[in-house]
Structure formats: C-alpha cells, structure tokens
Amino acid sequence: MSHRIELSTVEKTFGAGASAVHAFGPVSMTVEAGEFVSLLGPSGCGKSTLMLMTAGLLEPSKGSITIADIPVTGPQTDIGIMFQDNTLVPWRSVRGNIELQLEMRGIVPATETEKIDALLRAVQMEDFADRFPYELSGGMQQRAAFCQAMIHSPQTMLLDEPLGKLDAMTRESIRSDLQRLWMQERPTVMFVTHSIEEAVQLSSRVAVITPRPGQIERVLEINLPYPRDFDVKNTPEFSAYVRETQEIFRGYGVI
C-alpha cells in the first residue's frame, strides 16, 4: 500500500542571528497515498530543501513530517529518491547499478532478475543492460536511475527535478516512462519541478510555491484523465491550467 505524506507547519532557517536565512515555510500539506503531487516554483524557493527534509536528509527548523504516520527523524531507506544528477556508480553496468540497490537492502539480485528485466523493458533500456554509465546519453542514464529507484518497489518516491538537465524531446519521452511506471505501481510521488507544463501534465495536484521563503500559494487540482500523452497539451483544459499557474507567478513578478 502507498504511503501518505503529511507536512505540519514545516519551516527551514539556515544560520542564526543576524545572518540567518529563512529559506522555507511555514508549509502544511498532505500528499495522499498513491497521489502524484508536484511542487512547482521558481529557483531558490526551497522546493529541494523541502524534498531533503521529507527524505530525512535535512532536519526542519520547525514543524514535523510524517510518512505513513511515522515521524521522519532521519534518513528514509525504504523510499525511492531521484535527483537532477543521477547516482549511478561509473564502475557498474546499468544492471549492476540496479542490483546495487537490492544488495544494499540485503536482497539477492538473482532472485529479482525478472523484475529488473521488466523495469528495463518499461523504459526501453533492455538493450543497454550491460552498458556502463559513460556509454549512455543523459536521457539513458536517467532511465537507468528510474529503474534503480523503483527496483525495491518503494511506496513513496521523491523526485527532485530528475528531468531538469535533459533536452526537450528526451524530457517528453521520459515523462511518458515515469507516468507509465507510476500508473502501474501507484507509489505516492512528490515531484519537484520549475516547469509549469511538466507539472500539469504529470500531476494529480500541483502545489504552487512562492519565491523565498517558499510557501504554498495555491494547490491546483488537475482534473485531466490519465494517461496524459503529448496531445493533452493541445486541449483547452490543459492550456487553462497552464494560464492559471502563469498568472500566479506573474503576480510575484517571477514571469
């Protein structure tokens, strides 16, 4: 079963005294089990800070975070995490990197061969299983990283701008892969992005974050049927969500 994420008056301040920087919050919100929620905001608004706090890699200055009703008090090992820069190790093949996630959890990779193969097929990487990261394009590396993050069937996934460094065509292709994997497994997803179209295309809800210190200006319900392919962008409903979001950021002088 997917896990519910709850943020309660979460804040983060870096430093102390006159040099203190209020980076984020206060923010309260709930990501329901199985939801795909995007955190959408300009650079420097604290989206990644919130992601690190949710993962237990950074301690909130105030407030609390729970996953599946359990307080986050340290690094979470049973979730899937992806960052803008992938965490593939260069001395292992694609398959070896995926197996590494299993080994770290005490799972014998040989027992999960069929699952590894299925994940690789799902992201069109079955012909590159024995290639090393340096032999792959950036898009292929991110596909491999998706498999790495999904292999232990996490109930919660935290994705911090995993498509940020990719070209437009590759981003579109990997969005489809990500959406398909989410629809198959239905983990709870918290997705950080600064792309309005990306947030609308992927998400069940979009939390619009203000400039620093980041706070939630509005949460938009995206009532578009899944799967959402490239053609959804040509619909008036999609355009309306994009315009609504743009108007929010215009009000802050961001665009």
Image (cartoon, rainbow, N blue to C red):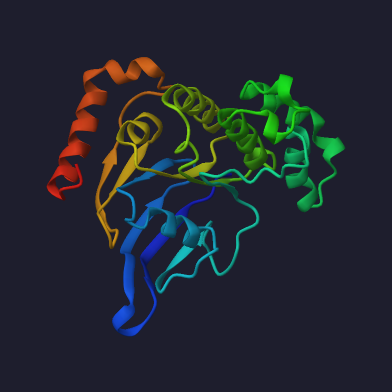
- Residue farthest left in this picture: 251
Looking at this view, is 223 or 202 the one in front?
202
Q: Quadrant of the image for the N terminus?
A: top right
Relative horizontal placement of residue 110, taking residue 35 as reference (left or right): right
Q: Relative to 63, say whether 169 is above or below.
A: above
Q: Quadrant of the C terminus?
A: top left
Residue located at (31% from left, 20% from top): 233
* Location of residue 160 with respect to 163 vertically, above or below: below
At a point 58% along the width and 45% down the height, the residue shown is 155
In the shown orientation, is residue 205 left or right of residue 147?
left
Which residue: 38% across, 53% down?
47
**x, y (%) of residue 52?**
49, 59
Q: Is residue 107 above or below residue 54?
A: above
Direction front: furthest residue: 134
Residue at x 44%, y 70% (from the top left corner)? 60
Q: Position of residue 31 (x, y in %)?
A: 42, 49
